[in-house]
Amino acid sequence: MSRPEHVSPPELFYNEREASKYARSTRMMQIQSQISERALELLNLPDNTHGLLLDVGCGTGMSGSVIEENGHAWIGVDISKDMLDIAATNIKDEGSDGDVVHRDMGTGLGFRGGVFDGAISISAVQWLCYSSHKEHVPKLRLKRFFQELYGALRRGARAVLQLYPETPQQMELITSAAMAVGFTGGVVVDYPNSAKAKKFYLVLSAGQPTQLPRGKDGAGEERPLFHPGRRSANADTVDYESERRGFRGKKRSRNEDVNIKSREWVMNKKDRQRRQGKEVARDSKYSGRRRKGKF
Amino acid sequence: MKLLTHNMLKCNVKGVNNGYPLKIEVTTKEIRETEMNPAFLQGIVEKLEWPVFRAAAAQLGEEGLPEAVTPELLEQEDFLKKFHRALLEVVVVEGALICPESGRKFTITNGIPNMLLNEDEV
Ligand SMILES: C[S@@+](CC[C@H](N)C(=O)[O-])C[C@H]1O[C@@H](n2cnc3c(N)ncnc32)[C@H](O)[C@@H]1O
């Protein structure tokens, strides 16, 4: 069950075939539109504004269409020319006020300062955590991305990044990179108790502290606010490996109340593997304990 | 590429201090109609580098934009139409963008500027 990020670099993964499959899938369209709507809601733009938004990893322009329906113009950047070619065709055919640029966000964004009223990114930023070329250092690429994102936003504007972190460490890496360049904000988790619907939104504000909105259906599962210099209290107690609908059909059943890497989690996993006939280390009082001295 | 995008883009290649405004080379252009949104135009004005926009518009055959924008102009239908057309309807389909400082050329194909950087430019 491999994630696209493990398969090949994004510019190769989203090739002509994958791009046209992506663009034609009505299911994909539904999911991405819903996420985009939510991201726009979290941007919290004043009513009746008609601004200019940035769409990072805009793909074929599904998220852009939602921006447009909400009365804004947009500029999208993406690393896949095949995705962008479809976006360009859609923009032309629909008489859209969107526009797209071929760009690797890990090399910055290349916009003047303060020009965007907000930014969204739907299902894209986790790609920066993978190093598909030997020169790519995730930490540096994240830094470059966030620096230029911060610069391109109007002071006080927000960026809402919906993403699929593979591990809690990835979420931490991404969040701390954002905080390091001056963003404030934190993670909003929608539907934390549903493996299918669970979604992570990194809600960031450029130059103004934000009051984080509540996650949907999020009773008791609200992520704490991140402050610069303060680590999230329990960033590593959440099961981040949400199911990624659309990328893979297979559903994962997992007891979501169990913290990843806890003793209970380890025991469950071992049980599962035993049932699958795999060789599993015997249980001991050390099972599931944190090993010291490792990073 | 629309002129709105041109107005916002800069060259951020390593070592370049002033990669703005990018020069435009036009091989083919088109007019693609979109619906006019006066509220958007009134808001975006303050974010535009107006002289850059005006010069780019003129280069693409959209003459007659004023040297400066006044609040009164922003209420005039005539002006808004011209403004809208130059900002969002004129599209550079094939051509290039050129960094004013380094001369680095970014090609535009199928209306999409290629701003990908080489490793040594990051
Ligand atoms: C799942 S698609 C989402 C597309 C679009 N946002 C949507 O909601 O339909 C992820 C997109 O991220 C883009 N992407 C991945 N890594 C990128 C990078 N380093 N720079 C720019 N775009 C990237 C991919 O090319 C792909 O189009």
Image (cartoon, rainbow, N blue to C red):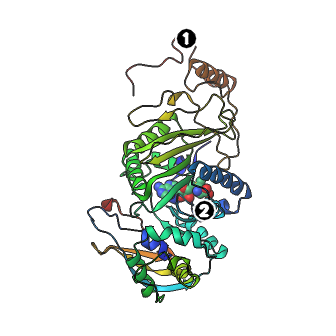
Q: Residues within 10 Å of mark 1 (few under 14, many from 20)?
A: few
For mark 2, name the chain: A
Q: Position of residue B8 (x, y in %)?
A: 43, 68
Q: Position of residue A135 (x, y in %)?
A: 35, 52
In this orientation, does residue B51 appear? yes
- Identify which residue, A35 or A139, lies in the foreground: A35
* A71 displayed left or right of A52: right
In this orientation, does residue B110 appear? no
For mark 1, name the chain: A
Which quadrant of the render holds ligand 1? bottom right
Which residue corresponds to mark 2? A64
* A66 displayed left or right of A176: right
Q: Earlier in the sequence, mark 1 or mark 2?
A: 2
The extreme front residue here reads B72
- Identify which residue, A276 or B34, lies in the foreground: B34
Q: Position of residue A230 (x, y in %)?
A: 41, 31
- State the residue at coordinates (44%, 51%): A132
Q: Classify A158 as above or below A54.
A: above
- State the residue at coordinates (42%, 87%): B59
Q: Amino acid at mark 1?
A: Ser
The disc at residue A284 is 1
Element under disc 1: loop
- State the residue at coordinates (41%, 65%): B116
Q: Give the number of marks.
A: 2
* A181 displayed left or right of A225: left
